[in-house]
Amino acid sequence: MALILLVEDDRIITAALSRALTDAGHVVRAVGQAAEALRILTEEQPDLILLDLGLPDIDGTDALRMIRSVSDVPVVVATARRSETDIVHLLNSGADDYVTKPFSGEHILARIAAVLRRYRRGVDEEGPGTITVGPLVISRKERRVAMNGESLKLTRREYDVLTYLAERVGQVVSRRELMTEVWRQARIGEEQTIDVHISWLRRKLGETAAKPRLLHTVRGVGVMMVDPG
């Protein structure tokens, strides 16, 4: 069972989704505006947010960024946008997963269950200890990351990817492996999700694909974290 914050302004869709989620054993808190969702987020700490992008008060993508600025709660976005550019933009903004409209109740329940499993597995398996790779220090117990002594603000997924790579310094990790082991799924054709997160990690680490220091791309194979010594 999870507390799910449903952010959807269409009453018919809200009623249908609330019924499906409740029948699946979840507790649903439904609101129709992003501003109300942000207020509830800080007060009730939901386990997951199901966010529609077509909200009346704030653009859904902007709402997603606002959510990410105050919380690391898993977010599944419901959108009618289907282009790769739009999807990459959503992932850049902090979405953990997405569903494209129209979708069935079974589909959204499966996506929500998968995201919750990945999130809970990451929390349960997170152990004590520190990983150090050159100037990078990952404090696993506190889920904190520092570069050259300065704290980095990472999303939960960026942290998971960075830690997975740091645990395998000197090993080439394929995009498919990251999708399978970090995202806990292997949807064919969606490996661009990995590229998005690697790109954002590089920016936060102060490097680029052309001039890597820690994250090196092995063309046609994957990515490898290197200890610069």
Image: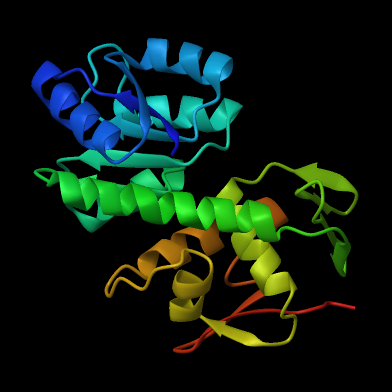
Q: Quadrant of the N terminus?
A: top left
Q: Quadrant of residue 13?
A: top left
Of 15 and 22, the residue lying toward us: 22
Q: Residue at x 16, y 22 (%)?
A: 15
Image location of residue 107, percent across then percent down: 20, 52
Image location of residue 45, percent across then percent down: 55, 24
Q: Quadrant of residue 162?
A: bottom right
Q: How is the image coloured?
A: rainbow
In the displayed structure, 107 sits above or below 179; it is: above
**Number of marks in the rendered image:** 0
Q: Does residue 180 appear to the left or right of 124 in the view shown?
A: left
User: Could one spot residue 155 in this view of the protein?
Assistant: yes
Q: Quadrant of residue 189?
A: bottom left
Of 100 and 60, the residue lying toward us: 100
Q: Quadrant of the C terminus?
A: bottom right
Of 24 and 178, the residue lying toward us: 24
Image location of residue 127, percent across then percent down: 79, 59
